[in-house]
Image: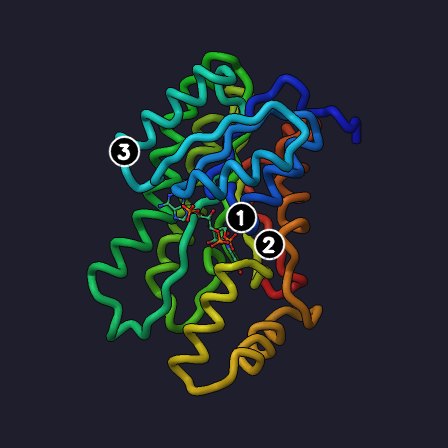
Amino acid sequence: MNTQSLAGKHAVVTGAGRGIGAAIAAALAQAGARLTLMGRNRAQLEAQAGKLATEVHVETCDVTDPENVQRAFGGAACALGDVSILVNNAGQAESQPFTKTDLGLWERMLAVNLTGTFLCTQAALPGMLGAGWGRIVNIASTAGLKGYPYVSAYCAAKHGVIGLTRSLALELARKNITVNAVCPGYTQTGLLEASLAQIAQKTGRSTEEARAELTRANPQGRLVEPQEVAQAVLWLCLPESAAINGQAIAIAGGEV
Ligand code: NDP
């Protein structure tokens, strides 16, 4: 790979302050892209921006809020030009048995994981259409490809992300814009640590027992690293990946 394959491209990564989003931002920056980092926590975003050896802009943005999203994408375009790469990574995972899944939890999961992806894509797409080039990568999950117990709202939202991906990919197929989803299995991040704590608290098991159970779900017997997800995203964003469209690619050691 040409190490500056994304030189001149402006990439927006949502939820870029930590975890998988931070790894994605680092991989895109290494390939020469200019970056806008979005998320709700400015201090975390700025700390992350300081680690990247490229032109970086920071926008605080709650992806569930349409006005926030409009303002943030307007600011990003003013700072670094039209967005050519959008990575919809911001997400949250709350677990409850279905009988305890109230409307609030259901709506929170749909809002951040699915509606956030919709809103950010609507905000970035006009610039891509104008430029005649674009890459959209949605960070779904293996929970978008199969069911898991106790996370029905999260699973429904991530299945929705994959449906949106497949549909939009067909709509944009002749516009030089690709739309793909990346579906990590259990990945070593803060989100996973929070899930382990929740499982331990609800089942009375230790966090290490909970970790061992999630690790067993991966046929490779390990957790995925954020950098492994980031490399798949980078590959989808390369100019050479133009024929890969509408796919949902599992990064899960063979779990799916
Ligand atoms: P983290 O909790 O480490 O990071 C989540 C990121 O999303 C944070 O940067 C957070 O920033 C941001 N975020 C959360 N809510 C919002 C919001 N309303 N608006 C803007 N940003 C928001 O999680 P991961 O890195 O693990 O997760 C990243 C993505 O990967 C998610 O979509 C998740 O569903 C998916 N995924 C993760 C897996 C795992 O095992 N870790 C497995 C499969 C998929 P801030 O709080 O500052 O807003």
The residue closer to the viewer here, 251 or 162, is 251
The residues bearing labels 1 and 2 have C-alpha atoms spaced at a distance of 21 Å
Mark 3 or mark 2, which is nearer to you?
3
**Residue 243 in the image: above or below residue 175:** below
Question: Which of the two discs, 1 and 2, labels the residue nearer the N terminus?
Answer: 1
Residue 18 tag number: 1
Q: Amino acid at mark 2?
A: Ala
Q: Of discs 3 and 1, which sits in the foreground?
A: 1
Which colouring convention does the figure follow?
rainbow
Tag 1–tag 2 contact (CB < 8 Å) = no
- Residue lying at 67% horizontally and 62% vertically, measured from the top left: 253
The 10 Å Cα crowd at callout 3, few under 14, some 14 to 19, many 20 or more, is some
Q: CA distance from mark 3 to mark 2?
A: 29 Å
Say which of 73 and 140 sits in front. Answer: 73
Q: Nearer the viewer, mark 1 or mark 2?
A: 1
The answer to whether 90 appears left or right of 106 in the picture is: right
Q: Say whether mark 2 is within 8 Å of ligand 1.
A: no
Q: Which image quarter is the C terminus in?
A: bottom right
Asked if ligand 1 lies within 8 A of label 1, the reply is yes
Which tag, 3 or 1, sits closer to the chain's start? 1
Please tell me the numbered disc located at residue 66. 3
